[in-house]
Image: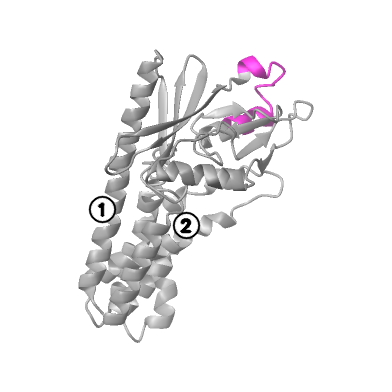
């Protein structure tokens, strides 16, 4: 999730179990510790763009790394707070703050290697968007009030809000998925895979994809708290299959390996971009929740198979038309 939310959730948990006299220290330690796991973003390569994808949300976000990450955060905080708190109290707050990071990221749709090194599966619970203003601003308000009033009770209310909001996201996801499966049945499709996750900044409109008969079908599903689900149909696009579409691809080449790495990152939701035939895109993300145009992908060059692919963003320009369409979806209006 976004760094501010990570820091806030990292702060609210230590706050909620601290005393009044230590609450401000607990908040600061937790906030910094909640940010630390994203230090993996520095792992990059100028020649291998996919290296960032390999390591972001990998070992620093795993369950087994929490004690280590908490220790690193505690050692840093101890340099400034050793006259105020014991090292073990600092470590306790840092451990809690750091530990929230991997769970919050797993609640999004990006994919987190929570079980590394025992599994490289990128787990995503698809309960909340990577950016959600309602979640972030409400939590920020409660964290600040708890600090100002030195109130663990307000922090506990904030923690309860955070957990309840994420659980509501899971409930909304199930409603959207049920609506999606009903739609597929009405079309007579035998569904092989389903992906449902919230569109940017809300828990009302969900990007929904299912695979059937060699195609992905993309649509937006609005699930209002007090209304029946509403479907905004998109289009279908062919499932990418390298064996059928890239006949000249050498299985021993760097290109083959890079495509496989990108496939793992994207959970195999790969398509050839409908406007760029040399781009393999990650269908999970689109500028509109019912669009078949991926917003990022890798460029395939069969003439240079022993060089790493390039990765870039596509179709990320937010036009007035796209904004108006998205607002209409949020309000449950019909599209024209």
Specify whether 59 is left or right of 148.
right
Residue on which disc 2 sits: 2
Of the numbered discs 2 and 1, the one sitting upstream in the chain is: 2
On whether residue 248 falls in the magenta region, the answer is: yes
Assign a secondary structure to mark 2. Answer: loop
Image quadrant assignment for residue 124: top left
Question: Residue 173's mark?
Answer: none
Is the residue under label 1 in contact with that under label 2 (CB below 8 Å)?
no
| Label 2 to label 1: alpha-carbon separation | 19 Å
Residue on which disc 1 sits: 164
Query: Closer to the camera, 130 or 300?
Result: 130
Assign a secondary structure to mark 1. Answer: helix
What is the x, y in percent for residue 7?
41, 65
On whether residue 229 falls in the magenta region, the answer is: no
Instruction: Single out the mark in the foreground, 2 or 1.
Output: 1
Q: Residues within 10 Å of mark 2 (few under 14, many from 20)?
A: some
Query: Closer to the camera, 269 or 44?
Result: 269
Total tally of numbered discs in the picture: 2
State whether residue 126 is above or below residue 302.
below
Specify whether 72 is left or right of 138.
right
Would residue 208 be seen by someone viewing this image from the given angle? Answer: yes
């Amino acid at each position: 999730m976004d760094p501010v939310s990570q820091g806030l959730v990292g702060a609210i948990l230590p706050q909620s179990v601290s005393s009044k006299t230590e609450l401000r220290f607990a908040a600061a330690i937790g906030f910094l510790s909640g940010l630390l796991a994203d230090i993996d973003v520095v792992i990059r390569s100028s020649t291998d763009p996919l290296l960032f994808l390999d390591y972001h949300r990998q070992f620093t976000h795993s369950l087994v790394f929490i004690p280590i990450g908490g220790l690193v955060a505690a050692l840093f905080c101890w340099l400034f707070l050793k006259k105020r708190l014991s090292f073990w109290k600092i470590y306790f707050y840092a451990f809690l703050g750091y530990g929230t990071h991997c769970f919050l990221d797993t609640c999004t749709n990006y994919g987190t290697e929570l079980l590394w090194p025992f599994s490289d599966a990128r787990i995503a619970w698809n309960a909340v968007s990577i950016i959600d203003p309602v979640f972030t601003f409400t939590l920020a308000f409660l964290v600040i009030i708890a600090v100002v009033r030195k109130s663990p009770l307000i922090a506990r209310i904030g923690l309860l809000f955070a957990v309840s909001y994420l659980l509501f996201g899971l409930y909304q996801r199930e409603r959207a998925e049920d609506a999606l499966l009903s739609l597929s049945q009405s079309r007579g499709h035998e569904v092989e895979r389903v992906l449902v996750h919230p569109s940017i900044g809300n828990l009302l409109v969900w990007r929904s994809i299912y695979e059937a008969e060699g195609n992905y079908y993309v649509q937006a599903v609005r699930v209002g708290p007090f209304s029946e689900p509403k479907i905004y149909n998109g289009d279908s696009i062919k499932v990418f299959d390298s064996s059928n579409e890239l006949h000249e691809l050498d299985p021993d080449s760097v290109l083959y390996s890079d495509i496989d790495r990108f496939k793992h990152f994207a959970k195999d939701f790969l398509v050839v971009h409908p406007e760029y035939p040399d781009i393999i895109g990650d269908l999970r993300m689109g500028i509109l929740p019912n669009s078949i145009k991926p917003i990022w992908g890798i460029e395939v060059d069969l003439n240079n198979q022993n060089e790493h692919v390039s990765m870039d963003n596509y179709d990320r320009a937010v036009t007035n038309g796209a904004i108006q369409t998205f607002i209409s979806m949020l309000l449950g209006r019909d599209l024209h």
